[in-house]
Image (tube, rainbow, N blue to C red):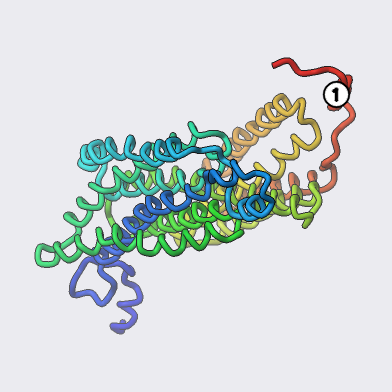
Amino acid sequence: MSDQNLIEKQPFLQDNDNSPTLKIRYVITFLCFVGSTLIYADRVNWSIAILYMARPESAITNSTDSEVNESSSQIVSTFDWNMKTQQIILGSFYCGYSVGPILGGLLVGRFGGFSMLMTGILFTTVSMLVTQFAAHFGVGFVIFTRIIDGFGQGIAYPANLVLIRNWSKADERNTLLAIAFSGSSVGPIITSYISTWLCSSEFMGGWPSTFYLYGTVGVVWCVVWFIVGSKTNMQSNLQAGLLNVAPHMCVLFMAVIGGLLGDYLISHDKLSIIGTRRLLNTFCFGLTAVFIIILGYVYNSNLSVTILVFAFGIYGFKFAGVNANVLDIAPVHSGIIIGIMVSIGSTGGLAATTLLGVLTETNNTLRQWRVEFWTQAALQICALLAFFIFGSDKLQEWAKQPEEPADIELQH
């Protein structure tokens, strides 16, 4: 066999200095640098975004000035946060950050730097992605996300240090350590320009776009970090944990994207309400069916895991699809209807595991798994077709409430 063929059969990531392939310690150092850049970008972004999130005093005191109101409405959300509230929000970060490094330093010895850095970045990523929703729910929710954000970043700090210690050679440790932590300077530099520009724009409402941008970067970082972990022999128990976390993180991300897309399509009259629900359900059930079928014909383990994560994660579109449709047809009875839906839907888990057990009990082959995958895909398509045929966005007669007399005043 030729040397070229031998090289092609080698793993991409190696920690052998005599190997022509990329050294794993350099990849880990670079990802630590990106992670450090991300978490410091999040800190600076908050300092900039909160100026646009809080209603300026001029927009309150001079509410009769149409010029001020018009310009403010384009880039500033209407949160009545005075300076004290803003400082509490910014300062709450350190409630989590003061605890995170200590606890992270203890946990990193038990679970390893790889898993703890992943956990820290996940906390920060989720905090960024839910910021807009937390802000609309109230200051308390914002403070809570900031505490979680600080806790995650506190965990990441000692994890970064331990990773470089474990994966660097003595004669290059100082250099790799400096590179890994230099993101603390790069992040603020980049963010100062990007966040100011985005907050001043009308893209996705201005300031929310900054959190979605850095949150998306965090999701991508987590996926790459997971792939790098699967290429090494580090902590097989971590990989099992990541396999459990990754699909749910993907669901969270897709749910946010689906909600934003649904609101945009409806509010800008791009699609009708029922058209929007059908589109999002097509993403949810249709794409899931496609990914499930493909899964039965993939032989690469890493690719299989990636497809499985996306197949599960795409279900996040259901929240703005079939779930939101309940509010269209019967908002008054939405609680009991969604409860019935979940109860009936949970029987699918029992049926699927039972079928899989029957198919693979005596003949656990890929062919049998394909039967399971095709069956599940067929059920997804049936659910999609059922919604296309019977789905409606009209308020149902049985869900209408009698109109109250107009002269009844609400008592406060």
Say which residue appears at 21% left-offset and 41% top-offset: 105
Q: Look at mark 1 in the image and give the residue it sits on.
A: 401
Q: Residue 79: which quarter of the image?
A: top right
> Camera-side residue: 99 or 55?
55
Q: With 408 as the anchor, is 240 left or right in this view?
A: left
> Camera-side residue: 166 or 324?
324
Q: With 352 as the anchor, is 279 left or right in this view?
A: right
Q: At which x and y percent is residue 403?
A: 88, 23
The number of callouts visible is: 1
Say which residue appears at 55% left-offset and 37% top-offset: 80
Secondary structure at badge 1 equals: loop
Q: At which x and y percent is residue 34?
A: 34, 60
Q: Amino acid at mark 1?
A: Gln
Q: Point out the image quarter for the C terminus.
A: top right
Vertically, is 250 above or below 213? above
Answer whether residue 203 is visible to the viewer in this image: yes
View extreme (top): residue: 411
Q: With 161 as the anchor, is 214 left or right in this view?
A: right
- Residue density around tag 1, few if under 14, some if 14–19, many if 20 or more, within 10 Å: few
